[in-house]
Image (cartoon, rainbow, N blue to C red):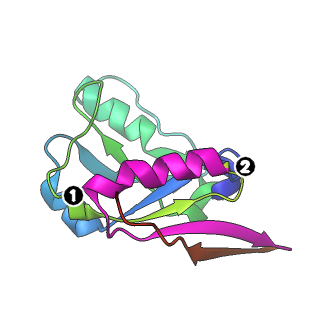
Amino acid sequence: MWAHYAGQFNGICVAYDFKKLLGSLENGSFVRMNYSEQAPILGTPVFRLDKMARVALSTKNHRWMTEREWRLFAPSRGKVAYTDASAACAIYIGSRVSTRVRNQILELLKPSRPTIPIYKMSIDGYQIKFGRVLRRPSR
């Protein structure tokens, strides 16, 4: 889904160990997306407003079914925190991310997770490939 969600390959993707992430969320919860030909009918407010909003925001057209997406909902605006830093298990950098931005990402990750694997995307015809980025040790 890089072309849709990462600015035509000009973005990053953080991969998570879902069990670790789920177990260490301080606020927020995940909902599996529902894919349907029809939008949900909410009708009269039988449920609480937050539950109706969750139903509406976790439904997509069936054409997007291949995504197999989960959505993260928070009780209020702002960050959703998690306590286990090892829940983030890899970083993928799109092929159109500039060298300057890629270097900034590498610098930012040095102190917090020096061992997290980072992969850079390359495109060969219609094939997307990821190669491991080797990082220099911190000075």
> Where residue 102 sits: x, y (%)?
57, 52
Tell me the CA gap for discs 2 and 1. Answer: 28 Å
Residue at point 86%, 74% (across, down): 125
Provide residue 37's location: percent of width, then percent of height.
61, 51
- Dividing the picture into quadrants, the one containing residue 54 is top left
Q: Is 6 a magenta residue?
A: no
Check if residue 121 falls in the magenta segment: yes
Tell which of 41 and 138 is nearer to you.
138
- Residue type at mark 2? Gln
Q: Which residue is denoted by mark 1 in the rendering? A: 85
Quarter of the figure that contains the C terminus: bottom left
Residue at 54% over, 47% down: 60
Q: In the visual, does 57 lie left or right of 111?
A: right
Which badge, 2 or 1, comes first in the chain's sequence?
A: 2
Horizontal side of 117 relative to 20 (left or right) equals: right
Question: Type of residue at label 1?
Answer: Ala
Depicted 9 relative to depicted 86: above or below: above
Q: Nearer the viewer, mark 2 or mark 1?
A: 1
- Quadrant position of the N terminus in the picture: bottom right
User: Which numbered marker is on residue 126?
Assistant: none
Q: Give the residue at x 29% y 65%.
A: 18
Looking at the rendered structure, the secondary structure element under dot 2 is loop
What segment is highlighted magenta in the picture? 99-125
- Residue situated in front as seen by the camera: 41 or 60: 60
Asked whether residue 132 is in view, the answer is yes
Residue 61's x, y, as percent? 60, 49
Query: Disc 2 designates what residue?
Result: 8
Q: Is residue 46 visible?
A: no
Q: Quadrant of residue 58?
A: top left
